[in-house]
Amino acid sequence: MKILMVGGGTGGSVTPLIAIAQYLKNQKTDLEFIWFGTYKGPEKNLVLAADIKFIPIFSGKFRRYFSWQNFIDIFFIIFGFIQAFVYFFKFKPDVMISAGSFVAVPVGLVAFIFRCPQIIHQQDIVTGLANKILSFLANKITVTFPEQVANFPSSKVVLSGNPIREEILQGNKSKAIQLLSLEKDLPTVLVVGGGTGAMKLNQLIQGALPELLQFCQVIHITGKNKKVQALALKDFSTRYHQFDFILNEMPDILAVADLVITRGGMGFLTELAALGKPTLIIPIPDSHQEANANYFVQQRAAIYLDQNKISSQSLIDDLKELIADKAALNYLGINIKKLYQPMAAQIISESLLTLFNEKINNR
């Protein structure tokens, strides 16, 4: 059985698929995985670390507003379609699964032409354009939350939850303390701007550091080529730990965090939910992440800060108040954990296997 997984450009469309691959590998041995991703996205290292064959293809983004890049990207989409067509001939995948990435659109069209059954997984509260397009071609559509079920045909939709990689649950707090020489009695704040980083978020943290480090220690994952200059830290410089990207140590880093500041990507938010981590969300303005953040706030599972309305000083004030309120942190941790569905990888995997069996029976 050959399973084609498609995703990239950001880590959000990648980690749920890796979780599904891990579950399937634990259940069956007669499987072969192939991954189509982008040339420049952060997914390659994640996919190779999961021992999956990675093949980059051209891709273009569908923008719902006027941009000269739309005229350029149409050619990349065509090139990606041609590449996908060639690779389908070569590898002959039995089933395909994607999770919302724009790179999946030309591949999904090729899969439809080749009569390869496909599943799309909808993580975010708001359905992205890529999944809207592919929903007409998909055999099954899995969704994260009950509120999303009505957005798709009832004959196709499956309420699954959002899967996470198995190693996320295996983090070791002591390892992180030893690795970074952390102070055991000082609160630890983890800042993550997503797979590609977030310059505005980095700048907010940069401005807050001198005062922030007086009452907590900060682990800051900035994104590739987005490191910041940590100035005027004086005696508190040992409390600031900056990385552009973390792979193997991420479960341990998550385990040691008392509070997480992040963007609003559902992949990472689901990992935080699984761990019950108190979370402060600063979503990308005017994006689908705002709907994700609003949903978590409605469930009393996170705090939402508007990037356009906050400053480094207001962020300091908010963090100081929240860290001092242990009951509030515990309340957030309990509520966010309620949003995690531990059976998600199994539910989606079973749907994938069902499609494969139906394909075999219909030959």
Image (cartoon, grey):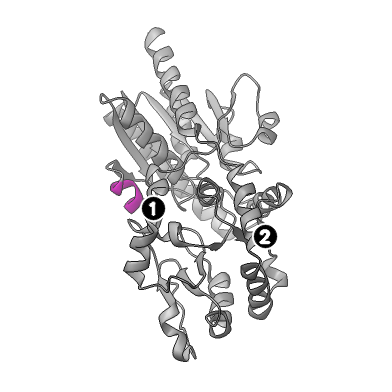
Q: Quadrant of residue 78?
A: top left
Q: Is residue 3 above or below residue 101?
A: above
Task: Give the residue type that dot 1 points to.
Answer: Gly
Instruction: Name the dominant secondary structure of the magenta segment.
Output: helix
Magenta residues, as a range? 40-49
Mark 1: which secondary structure? loop
- SS class, disc 2: helix
**Closer to us: 187 or 237:** 187
In the image, what residue occupies the spot 68% across and 64% down? Answer: 305
Q: Residue 132: image x %, image y %?
A: 61, 36
Q: Give the residue type at disc 2.
A: Ala
Spatial distance from mark 2 to mark 1, Cα to Cα? 24 Å
Who's the residue at 70% across and 65% down the image? 306
Quadrant in which the C terminus is drawn: top left
Q: Is residue 59 magenta?
A: no
Q: Residues within 10 Å of mark 1 (few under 14, many from 20)?
A: some
Report which residue position mark 2 lands on. Answer: 328
Q: Nearer the viewer, residue 58 or 161?
A: 161
Magenta stretch containing residue 43, yes or no?
A: yes
Q: Which residue is mark 1?
A: 171
Mark 2 vs mark 1: which is more N-terminal? 1
Residue 362 left/right relative to 329: left
> Compared with residue 21, is residue 280 higher up or lower down, i.e. above or below?
below
- Quick check: 230 above or below 221? below
